[in-house]
Structures are given as structure tokens and as C-alpha cells.
Amino acid sequence: MRTTLTLDDPLAKELKKLAVETGQPFKNVVNETLRAGLRRPNVVPPRPYRLTPVAMGVPKPGVDLGKALQLADELEDGAIGAKLEQRK
């Protein structure tokens, strides 16, 4: 059956890429992809995992947790400095 189908651009690019990689016509790739999706209509998503929160203690004196990005930058700078020291 011939029909018009509108695909999202990213999806069309993936299908075209797959067609080129497999050497199959675009039409065949689309049909096989749809068939595969129809064969698995009742796929159950994985169960969500649960995280148990733990206390991390009291922040160091002078550390303002309201400035999280600044704290992250300082920690990253320290880690980079430690790596550079190991290279010497």
C-alpha cells in the first residue's frame, strides 16, 4: 500500500543512515523498523531504582552551600591541580 508518512527530521536521518549502512532501500528499513516495533507492543519499562539518601556531614567552615556552582568550581580546580601534580 502506498501512503504518505511525515517523519521527524532526526528520525528520518537515523533511518537514512541505517539504510546506507545496511545497503537496503529506505522503504525496506522503514518497514522493518515498524514491524519490529509492532512485534513488541507491550514492552514493560524497567522498574525505577530508588536511592537512599545519606547524611554527608557538616560543611567545612566558610563554605556557603548556597553557592553550589562556586563550590563545584573550587572542587574541580582542586582535582585538576592534583592531577597536574601527579604528572611532575
Image (spheres, helix red, strand yellow):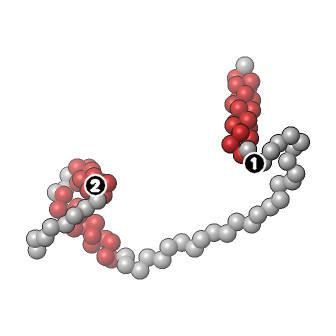
Percent of width and height locating residue 52? 74, 66
- x 76%, y 63%: residue: 53
Going by the picture, which residue comes out furthest to the left? Answer: 2
Percent of width and height locating residue 72? 70, 41
Q: Which amino acid does label 1 sit on?
A: Gly
- x 83%, y 59%: residue: 55
Q: Residue 9 carries which label?
A: 2
Q: Provide the secondary structure element on which disc 2 rests.
A: helix
C-alpha span from label 1 to label 2? 41 Å
Q: Is residue 13 left or right of residue 65?
A: left
Q: What residue type is labelled 2?
A: Asp
Q: In this view, does 2 lie above or below 19?
A: below
Q: Which of 43 and 13 is in front in this view?
A: 13
Say if residue 22 shows up in the picture: no
- x 31%, y 71%: residue: 36
Q: Name the residue under label 1.
A: 66
Where residue 83 sits, quadrant-wise, is top right
Percent of width and height locating residue 62? 86, 40
Image quarter in which the N terminus is found: bottom left
Q: Nearer the viewer, mark 1 or mark 2?
A: 1
Image quarter in which the C terminus is found: top right
Q: Is residue 60 above or below residue 87?
A: below
Q: Nearer the viewer, residue 29 or 81?
A: 81
Between discs 1 and 2, the one toward the N terminus = 2
- x 69%, y 37%: residue: 73
Q: Residue 4 carries which label?
A: none
Going by the picture, which residue comes out furthest to the bottom? Answer: 42
Q: Provide the secondary structure element on which disc 1 rests.
A: loop
Say if residue 84 shows up in the picture: yes
Q: Residues within 10 Å of mark 1 (few under 14, many from 20)?
A: few
Q: Which of 26 and 66 is in front in this view?
A: 66
